[in-house]
Image (cartoon, helix red, strand yellow):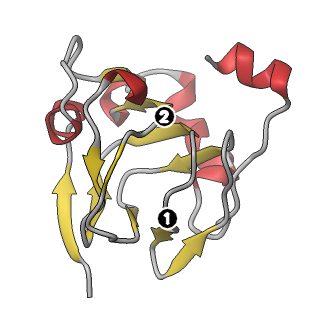
Amino acid sequence: MNKIVEINQVADYNKYVGADTLHPLVSVIDFSKLPPIRYVDTCKLYGFYAIYLRGAKFSDLKYGESTYDYQEDSLVFVAPGQVMGSEADGQYHQVNGYILAFHPDLLRGTVLENRMKDYSYFSYSVSEALYPSAEEKDIVI
């Protein structure tokens, strides 16, 4: 069984991966600018939303009780209260890709706060990534 680490704040996630925190509620990270990350037998319980534009696939992603279906250059979505982690191989990998992480407090008092539940790709019931075209990927970046 994997160890589960609670990461409730964006700043906590930034510290976990070795990135600077420029704002307490939102972060954009280019993983290619960070040191290599060691894949260990740990899953993260997220306290915020995360949208990953995944780079090279080094391992499977555990998503709740199942495996998330994704490939290189796919978009992966996580909502507060969800658990996700990579399969452990004990190796260091230079991760490429990006993350947009934002705390639910960033949306407080906005129309989007109540609409987030309408975006099904943040749901455990959807365990398949979105695959943007090359043009859409450039727009995301």
Residue 98: image location, x then y, percent: 49, 29
- Residue plotted at (67% across, 47% down): 118
Label pair 2/1, CB-CB below 8 angstroms: no
Q: Mark 1 sits on what residue?
A: 59
Residue 82: image location, x then y, percent: 40, 62
Disc 2 is placed on an element classified as: loop
Image quarter (top left, top right, bottom left or bottom right) of the C terminus = top right
Vertical arrangement, residue 141 with respect to residue 134, above or below: above
- Residue plotted at (25% across, 73% down): 41
> Label 2 vs label 1: CA separation?
13 Å
Q: Is residue 62 left or right of residue 54?
A: left
Circle nearer the N terminus (2, 1): 1
Q: Amino acid at mark 2?
A: Asn
- Residue plotted at (28% across, 40% down): 36
Q: Quadrant of residue 116?
A: top right
Q: Amino acid at mark 1?
A: Ser
Viewer-nearest residue: 18 or 108: 18
Residue 76: image location, x then y, percent: 59, 48
Crowd band around label 1 with a 10 angstrom C-alpha radius: few (<14), some (14–19), many (20+): few
Q: Is residue 66 left or right of residue 15?
A: right
* Badge number at residue 72: none
Residue 44: image location, x then y, percent: 28, 60
* Badge number at residue 96: 2
Vertical arrangement, residue 118 with respect to residue 70, above or below: above
